[in-house]
């Protein structure tokens, strides 16, 4: 019997579209834990936000992090809450909301939730 796939939220799909415009960097953990490897890479390379870091733990597992102006977050958190990050808001504004979220059919409840956090763009 096949496993039923979990439906991904429209808000997270919208966030994935925004993060697709962010530069991505790939690295290995080496002897460090994934988050430590990501922080060391950011410090050593002088990486500016926004950026996605794919940290390969082993041949089966890769951890994804989002480097934003407010710090290092899981990429999933950034996808679900993309509207909280000013640098991602700049990307949405440059591409255009109509183009970025075309076909997603975000409901009024989704937009109300996003607008509720509008203060984060200040």
Image (cartoon, grey):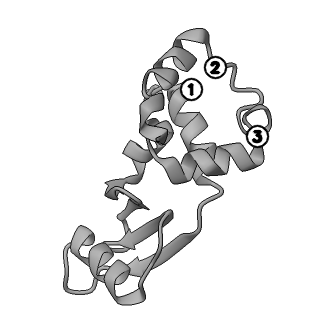
Q: Nearer the viewer, mark 3 or mark 2?
A: 3
Distance from the alpha carbon under mark 3 to that under mark 1: 17 Å
The crowding category of the residue bearing disc 2, from other C-alpha atoms within 10 Å (few below 14, some 14 to 19, many at least 20), is: some
Q: Which residue is mark 1?
A: 10
Confirm whether residue 2 shows in the render: no
Q: Secondary structure at mark 2?
A: loop
Question: Which residue appears at 41% of the width and 84% of the height?
Answer: 46
* Residue occupying image coordinates x 76% and y 40%: 96
Vertical position of residue 94 compared to residue 61: above or below: above
**In-front residue for pair 68/21:** 68
Does any portion of residue 113 appear in the rendered image?
yes
Residue at the spot of label 3: 96
> At numbered mark 3, what does the secondary structure look like: helix, strand or loop?
loop
Q: Quadrant of the N terminus?
A: top left
20 to the left or right of 121: right
For disc 2, the marked residue is 106
Q: Position of residue 69 (x, y in %)?
A: 41, 59
**Quick check: marks 1 and 2 in contact, CB under 8 Å?**
yes
């Amino acid at each position: 019997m096949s496993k039923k796939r979990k439906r991904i939220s429209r808000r997270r799909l919208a966030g994935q579209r925004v993060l697709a415009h962010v530069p991505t960097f790939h690295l290995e953990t080496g002897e460090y834990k994934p988050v430590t490897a990501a922080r060391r890479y950011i410090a050593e390379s002088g990486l500016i936000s926004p950026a996605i870091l794919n940290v390969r733990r082993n041949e089966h597992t890769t951890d994804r992090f989002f480097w934003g102006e407010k710090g290092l977050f899981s990429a999933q958190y950034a996808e679900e809450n993309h509207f909280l990050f000013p640098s991602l808001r700049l990307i949405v504004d440059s591409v255009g909301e109509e183009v970025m979220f075309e076909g997603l059919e975000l409901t009024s409840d989704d937009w109300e939730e996003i607008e509720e956090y509008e203060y984060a763009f200040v």
